[in-house]
Amino acid sequence: MKDISIVIPAYNASETIKACIDSVVKNVKDANLSYEIIVVDDGSKDNTLELLQKMAKKNKNIIPVTQKNAGPSAARNNGMKKASGKYIALNDSDDIWFEGKLKQQFDYLEQNPDVALVCSNYGKLNITDTFEITYKQEMFHNYFSPQTSVFRREVIQDFIFNEKMKYSEDMRFFLDVMSKYKCVFHSVLSTKNYFDKATFGSSGLSSHLWEMEKGELSNIKYVFKKGKIGLGIFISASIYSFIKFLGRCLISAIRK
């Protein structure tokens, strides 16, 4: 068994995939971990797969996987099913890990056997505390981000990504994990986007603000129906989410 499996979905990622993988390789080598990097090409139309195959010839720990285009959730699930590591880490094909990110998270999980999943700062987020994430906290701020997350492999025996959801499906996965496992936010600053793009209002999926908002609202409702939050939190979190949505729309309009 490897120490860790890193799963990366990739779609038309020829511009960023090398930098992404290079940052991962540096992290695992600095942490002195046995590893595999499973990159799932999600039916790319560019030369992403060709680049992956070239990298795999130079590094046997890089494992390219191909599938018909089915979205990032299906790609993550496909990669996680093939993972053999004691731990599984996620990254996105256009995200770069900062040096030392993985070692700090790996060491934290090794030292805290009651914790199943650890996530951390990303982009310009800079929370300096380490704490267990509660449902109440998560309803008002999404602390989870796939590219920062490392978790024990037993998690995927119970939960995978919802492939029917196109927006906020990553939040749904982490909400499910929280229902059974202890999840901790660690203060390490771990990743940045290759293009340094904004978290919303930019091209791609992040530009579909209303679809994203509907996904977030559905997640709040999902948690309420499961009895994880009360009616008061459900109402206030939904209102707060919609206010954030209006603010994002305004900022997006200004940027245009």
Image (cartoon, rainbow, N blue to C red):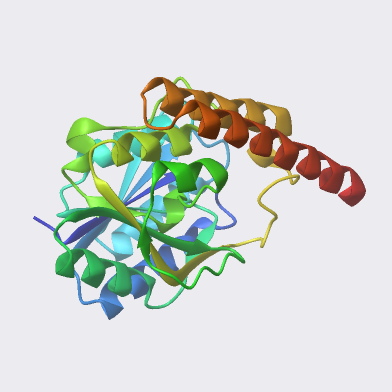
Q: Nearer the viewer, residue 19 or 199?
A: 199
Image position of 198 (left or right of 119)? right
Residue 103 image offset from top left, x and y in percent: 29, 73
In screen coordinates, is 163 left or right of 32? right
- The image quarter in which residue 86 lies: bottom left
Residue 31 vs residue 11, the one in the foreground: 31
The answer to whether residue 19 is seen in the rendering is no
Q: In this view of the protein, can residue 205 be seen by the observer?
A: yes
Front-most of residues 238 and 193: 238
Residue 146 located left or right of residue 27: right
Q: Is residue 84 above or below residue 109?
A: above
Q: Is residue 162 above or below residue 180?
A: above
Q: Position of residue 212 (x, y in %)?
A: 63, 32
Residue 110, x across and y down, in percent: 16, 67
| Badge count | 0
Residue for point 74% across, 46% down: 202
Q: Which residue is the extreme one toward the left?
A: 1
Quadrant of res 244: top right
At x 18% / y 46%, what residue is drawn?
Answer: 153
| Image spot of residue 198 (x, y percent) | 70, 54
Q: Quadrant of the N terminus?
A: bottom left
Q: Which residue is rendered at x = 91% and y = 49% of the image? A: 254
